[in-house]
Amino acid sequence: MLAEVLIFVPSVARFREDYLLDRLERAQIASLALLATPDDMVAPELEEELLENAEVLNVVLRRDEVRQLILSVPMPGEIYGTYDLRDPSAFELIRDAMWNLTMTEDQVIRVIGTPVRGAGEVIEVTMPTAPLRAALIDYGIRILILSAVISIFTAALLFLAVRRFLVKPMRRVVDHMTAYAEAPEDARRIIAPDAGVTELRDAEDALNSLQTQLTTALKQKDRLAQLGGAVAKISHDLRNILTVAQLLADRMERSEDPTVQRAAPKLVRSISRAVNLCEGTLAFGKAEELPPTLSRFNLGPLIDDVIDSETLACTGDAVTLVSEVPPALAIRADSEQLYRVISNLVRNARQAIEATGQPGQICVAAREEDAEWIICIRDTGPGLPPRARENLFTAFQGGVRKGGTGLGLVIAAELVRGHGGALELVQTDAEGTEFALRLPRSSAILDAAAE
């Protein structure tokens, strides 16, 4: 509508100006016919015909500083207004055109202009407004029809353009989303961005990235489900095998050999932990995670067991394991699960140091604060690479050692959360790595986490 106004209003104003200038030119031609006769006299019938052809009522021509009425017929009424076309402004032309267009009564107006070809100084005519208004309306209707045709044509082009560049690509995106929703595991249904519009291309790129990540995650979950089934079967058979080994270890405890008597308790505890691990794995495969069995115990012996086990696994004397746990420090937790967490962290540190071929040290320290127990595992290894830091607690992505699965820290963090605590990476750089295991002392928090 704004375009219509910007086109229609100036066009009508220009048409009115041309219309009035044409009437002035016709009136000048009619006056020249009179001036060409002897004594500037013509018959009344000819004078009336000249004015009728010029569509004016009278003509006044000023020449040589003399204002002279050249042609005239009786005036039907008083002059309503005067319009000077010698140097009008655009605002005046538009205002007067709108006034003439809306005036319903026939009025008499005076029009002043400059004669063409130097035929005088000023020419004035009086004319009725009815023919002018009829001409303006006719011209306005033609302009509106032309504008409507142009608008319809433009709207059709716009419709086709929107359909081609927006609607079809959007429908394609919707169809891709619908097809992908039917089988999100099928990578062939991931959208391939090809939109020409930048915004739609960005949306397709985002959808492609989202679908790719979702398909990868679904495939990974499917592999995890298959792996879980396989692990459950292995754990079931392994539990049976370990049960036999446990019976044999129990008999070894009754041996009178001093060396066997010293090694037998550790062997029994190790086999018991392996059996518990198998049972926990079977329960996890059934989506029935066992809650921690909370009891109060001295932390020092548990740390000593971890250090003894890892010392036996060390290759050479490259790694030194140290315990800085206060002898009287007692905590409330699940001893078996806590052993798995600390053993996992110490084992990771030992393997990282051994991979460098340089000597190093692993220190397990613990302290008691008002609200929590804190167990720190520090090592002097090479530190974690950036990729491992970004995916530290993500299954199958946080592994550092070649051949590792990246499940150790994930399981450890889950076991600590079951105690209502948190496993945190305190620092890692070229000087080494430190993890902090925080366990709350509040019984309410522990019980809630266990539930």
Image (spheres, rainbow, N blue to C red):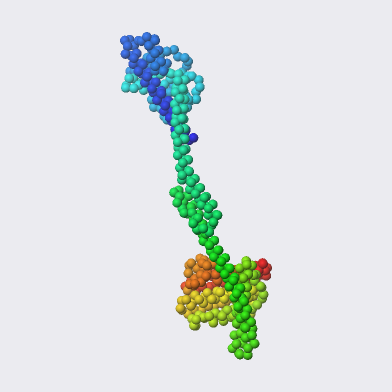
Q: Quadrant of residue 260?
A: bottom right
Front in this rendered view, residue 364 or 92: 364
Residue 323 lies in quadrant: bottom right
In the rendered image, residue 399, in percent from the top left (x then y), is placed at: 51, 70
Instruction: Give the vertical position of 163 relative to 209 (above or below).
Output: above
- Front-most of residues 99 and 158: 158
Residue drawn where x is 41% and y is 23% of the image: 20
Residue depicted at 36% across the width and 22% down the height: 114
Q: Position of residue 6 (x, y in %)?
A: 45, 33
**Residue 201 showing in the rendered view:** yes
Q: Is residue 269 visible?
A: no
- 85 and 18: which is toward the camera: 18
Left or right placement of residue 225 versus residue 200 in this view: right
Q: Quadrant of the C terminus?
A: bottom right
Q: Which residue occupies 57% across, 69% down?
A: 230
Q: Residue at x 49, y 35 (%)?
A: 1
Q: Quadrant of residue 147?
A: top left
Is 259 or 187 nearer to us in this picture? Answer: 187
Where 270 falls versus 113 (above or below)? Answer: below
